[in-house]
Image (cartoon, helix red, strand yellow):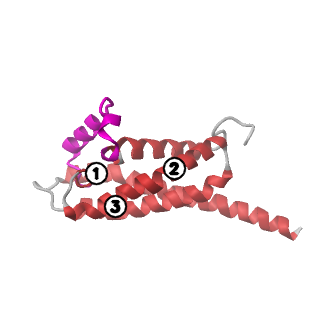
């Protein structure tokens, strides 16, 4: 562990840490939590408000039971069972400046950005009634694009870090 303060000299680690916690735990997985666990929290009200305000077909589909959204519910379970553990381990590792979490965060970023592509496609093509306005589509894209872009940047960042570590290890072998 570094003798520097937490995240010292690593501002992107702070972004990854905050991003992972806020998006996944407060919106994406809310409907998977046992009702008793979150009943007295603002999470259910926040999700209901968000759906009413945005008419987001993704969150609506994930919380519903329609068969046509089964693929999305599978992604949400994957998020809870694979991505959440990855980012929890990754967040602790980033907090401790432990480079061993880089491959885990690389996998998390790749998984997250990959699952966002069909979600964005659904936003643009799913027939919501009444149809989403251009303003609503713009709002949804403004909400989802950062969730695509940030994990993609995380993949690039972790790849560069891992390649740097490999380069140093290979140079040491030659000595």
Give the left or right position of residue 80, taking residue 171 as reference.
left
Number of callouts: 3
Query: In the image, which residues are magenta?
Result: 31-59
Q: Mark 1 — residue?
A: 140
First reached walking from the N terminus: tag 1 or tag 2: 2
Front residue (pair 48, 129): 48
Tag 3 and tag 1, C-beta contact below 8 Å = no
Residue 28 at x, y percent in the picture: 35, 48
Q: Which mark is residue 74?
A: 3
In terms of secondary structure, where does tag 1 sit? helix
In terms of secondary structure, where does tag 3 sit? helix
Q: Residue at x 20, y 56 (%)?
A: 65
Residue 39: name its quadrant: top left
First reached walking from the N terminus: tag 3 or tag 1: 3
- Label 1: few (<14), some or many (≥20) within 10 Å? many
> Which SS type dominates the magenta stretch?
helix
Q: Residue furthest right?
A: 175
Q: Which mark is residue 87?
A: 2
In terms of secondary structure, where does tag 2 sit? helix
On-image quarter of the N terminus: top right
Give the left or right position of residue 118, taking residue 173 as reference.
left
How much space separates mark 1 and mark 2, taking CA atoms?
24 Å
How much space separates mark 3 and mark 2, taking CA atoms?
18 Å
Residue 86 is at least partly visible in this image? yes
């Amino acid at each position: 562990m570094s003798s520097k303060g937490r995240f010292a000299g690593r501002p992107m680690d702070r972004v990854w840490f905050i991003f992972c916690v806020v998006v996944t735990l407060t919106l994406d997985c809310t409907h998977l939590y046992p009702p008793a666990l979150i009943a007295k929290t603002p999470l259910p009200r926040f999700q209901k408000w968000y759906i009413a305000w945005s008419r987001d077909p993704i969150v609506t589909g994930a919380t519903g039971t329609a068969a046509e959204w089964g693929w999305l519910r599978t992604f949400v379970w994957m998020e809870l069972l694979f991505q959440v553990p990855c980012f929890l381990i990754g967040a602790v590792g980033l907090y401790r400046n432990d480079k061993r979490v880089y491959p885990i965060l690389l996998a998390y970023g790749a998984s997250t950005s990959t699952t966002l592509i069909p979600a964005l496609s659904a936003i643009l093509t799913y027939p919501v009634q009444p149809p989403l306005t251009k303003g609503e589509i713009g709002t949804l894209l403004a909400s989802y694009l950062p969730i695509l872009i940030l994990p993609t940047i995380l993949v690039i960042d972790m790849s560069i870090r891992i390649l740097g570590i490999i380069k140093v290890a290979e140079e040491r072998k030659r000595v």
